[in-house]
Image (cartoon, rainbow, N blue to C red):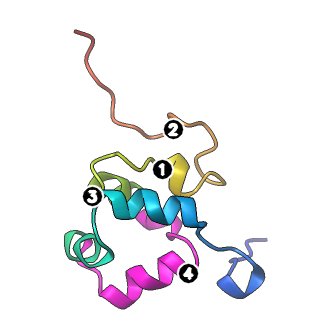
């Protein structure tokens, strides 16, 4: 059985993660890059990024905030879903 966690159930984005995201770009810019309303991104900051938006969000943040940073419950390995880089 799948249970969706909500902000009222104690799931929230911690201040350290918020600061990491905001060091890359503002909530407004992130929303623009993702085609989301500012209110939507604000709700993510009060809760968490939905699973289906994690990869797009990390990409919009130029991978400086990883899928693991955003949702360690879905991406438990710090390198999960990071783009592969070619060896020099």
Mark 2: few/some/many CA within 10 Å (<14, 14-19, 20+)? few
Task: Give the position of the C terminus as an image quadrant.
Answer: top left
Q: Residue at x 60, y 36 (%)?
A: 77
Q: Which residue corresponds to mark 4?
A: 46
Question: Between disc 2 and disc 4, whose residue precedes?
Answer: 4
Q: Which residue corresponds to mark 2?
A: 80
Q: Residue at x 25, y 18 (%)?
A: 86
List x then y, in percent, for residue 4.
68, 77
Q: Nearer the viewer, mark 2 or mark 3?
A: 3
Highlighted range, magenta: 34-53
Q: Is 37 left, or right, of 52 in this rendering?
A: left
Label 4, label 1: how far apart the Cα atoms are:
18 Å
Contact, mark 2 vs mark 1 (Cβ under 8 Å): yes
Q: Is residue 74 above or below residue 14?
A: above
User: In the structure shown, which secondary structural element does the residue marked by tag 4 occupy?
Assistant: helix
Q: 28 or 37: which is nearer to us? A: 28
Q: Which residue corresponds to mark 3?
A: 60
Q: Is 52 left, or right, of 59 in this rendering?
A: right
Q: Residue at x 33, y 35 (%)?
A: 83
Q: Residue at x 29, y 81 (%)?
A: 36
Label 2, label 4: how far apart the Cα atoms are:
24 Å
Label 4, label 3: how far apart the Cα atoms are:
19 Å
User: Would residue 57 be counted in the magenta stretch?
Assistant: no
Contact, mark 4 vs mark 1 (Cβ under 8 Å): no
Question: Between disc 4 and disc 3, whose residue precedes?
Answer: 4
User: In the structure shown, which secondary structural element does the residue marked by tag 3 occupy?
Assistant: helix
Label 1, label 3: how far apart the Cα atoms are:
11 Å
The label on residue 67 is: 1
Q: Is residue 9 above or below residue 84?
A: below
Q: Is 2 left, or right, of 85 in this rendering?
A: right
User: In the structure shown, which secondary structural element does the residue marked by tag 2 occupy?
Assistant: loop
User: Would residue 45 be counted in the magenta stretch?
Assistant: yes
């Amino acid at each position: 059985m799948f249970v969706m966690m909500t902000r009222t159930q104690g799931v929230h984005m911690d201040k350290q993660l918020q600061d990491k995201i905001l060091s890359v770009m503002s909530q407004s810019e992130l929303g623009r890059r993702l085609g989301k309303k500012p209110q939507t991104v604000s709700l993510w900051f009060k809760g968490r990024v939905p699973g289906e938006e994690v990869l797009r969000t990390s990409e919009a943040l130029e991978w400086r905030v990883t899928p693991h940073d955003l949702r360690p419950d879905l991406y438990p390995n710090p390198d999960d879903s990071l783009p592969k880089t070619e060896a020099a």
